[in-house]
Image (cartoon, helix red, strand yellow):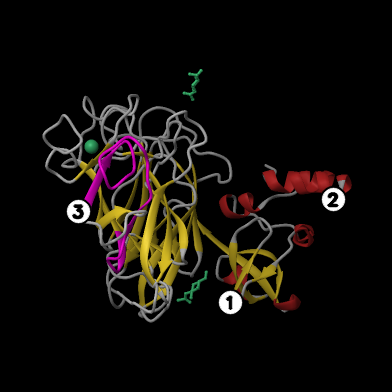
Amino acid sequence: MLLKYFFGLCVVFSVGFCENSRKSTSWKDFLFGGFKRDSRFLPLFTVVQIGPGNCVASSGEVGNCLPNSDCALRGGIPSGPCAGGFGLCCIFMQTCGGIIRENTTYFVNPNHPDVYDSAGSCQVTVQKIHPDICQLRLDFDMLSIAPPENINHICNQDQLLVSGGSPVPSICGTSNGDHMYVDAGLGLSNPIMISIITSGTSFPRIWRIRVTQIHCGSISRAPQGCLQYHTGINGKVKSFNYNVVSGRQLSNQDYSICMRTEKNFCSIQYSACADLENNRSRAFTISGNSNNVIGTMVGVGGQGSSSTNACGNDWLLFGCVKVASRPQSSSIACEDRICGGTFNAEVGLSSMPVSTNIRPFRIYFHADSSEAPIDIDNRGFCLDYVQQPCTNGLFN
Ligand SMILES: *[C@@H]1O[C@H](CO)[C@@H](O)[C@H](O)[C@H]1NC(C)=O
Ligand SMILES: *[C@@H]1O[C@H](CO)[C@@H](O)[C@H](O)[C@H]1NC(C)=O
Ligand SMILES: [Ca+2]
């Protein structure tokens, strides 16, 4: 029962140490076996301070820097010194049946970091650490559960569900590095439950979800209703379970992705991410049979499609986007919905950056409940965005 990264470190640092540690235990035993960790492990962790209260262990987890005696009392896993040796970097983890009572607690699969392959419902309850918590942020450091079925891309085997807060789409498949905000309401009303339901055939599931509690007055708070919130003048947005080789765009999605308007920025430009795996990019494949060349579809009137209903089923909604290289004064009409298999604001076969001046900067994603036979092998979307400065003192 030796933790994988201890193994890695052993190889680097000391064979003698490894021989000892093989007889001892890891935090996995600590968490799942109720075993107290050998203090000989502590020097292995390099602990980096990231501001008052938080610390990061070299294993990558974010912990809370606490007085030495508090960590074990509060059910945490001591993971090296912090605050110049005056505190312990204390990592909080919970798995099935657990109650989250500390900020920055990880919800992990049973046996983490090994995989979990059983059917059932694994749920944690999140209690607010303070009545003045308005939101939770879930960071999927790792999330890999069974993918949706391949006809209509419905999550019918595994699902991640969040209940008790604002509505959250249920997702499945692999979404490492993605995040979600959940509005948690005011006061200490209903707790929020995060569940992973698993069923069907064998699958090597693994998850490690960081749950951060956000104060109502915090600058990190996302605008209400934004499932995803991005700050900074550039970044990447993508659909859940996105992967250009084998991802399947999830059905039954309805949410918005919000970008904070940075100071002195007036417009935003979006372009399809690079796809280094396919000859023809699948970075934006929302509708149509992606095994064929599918152009851009826009609006709902049937433009760019032999179907009478271009972006009526699955679409991204922007406010008034135009091809970025066209002057905003150009007489070409702007578009709101884009779908199809090529990212552009005009019907065609080449992918082009698009831009909009509408603020706040938001993208709405809708996917209905069916795919085949019209929509096949759609991977979803990945877009790079970059905000554009206000020009000529004209804050339009
Ligand atoms: C929870 O921790 C995060 C850092 O992980 C911090 O930014 C946030 O302010 C903390 N929330 C509360 C309510 O203390
Ligand atoms: C790309 O095109 C080449 C030549 O047509 C083909 O052999 C190869 O399999 C294609 N690769 C992919 C990932 O489709
Ligand atoms: Ca669909």
Element on which disc 1 rests: loop
In depth, the one of 135 and 357 nearer the eye is 357
Residue 310 in the magenta stretch? The answer is no
* Location of residue 197 in the rendering, given as x and y in whole percent from the top left corner: 35, 43
- The reply to whether the residue tagged 1 has its Cβ within 8 angstroms of ligand 1 is yes
Circles 1 and 3: CB distance less than 8 Å?
Answer: no
Is residue 336 at least partly visible in the picture?
yes
Residue 192 to residue 371: above or below: below
Residue 103 to residue 150: above or below: below
Whether residue 165 sits left or right of residue 217 in the image: it is left
Q: CA distance from mark 2 to mark 3?
A: 63 Å
Q: CA distance from mark 1 to mark 3?
A: 51 Å
Image-quadrant location for residue 255: bottom left
Tell me which amino acid carries mark 1.
Answer: Gly
Mark closer to the observer (2, 3): 3
Q: Which residues are magenta?
A: 333-362
* Residue position marked by numbered label 3 in the rendering: 333
Is residue 128 at least partly visible in the picture?
no
Which numbered circle lies on residue 53?
A: 1
Which numbered circle lies on residue 13?
A: 2
Q: Earlier in the sequence, mark 1 or mark 3?
A: 1
Whether residue 258 sits left or right of residue 31 in the image: it is left
In depth, the one of 14 and 264 nearer the eye is 264
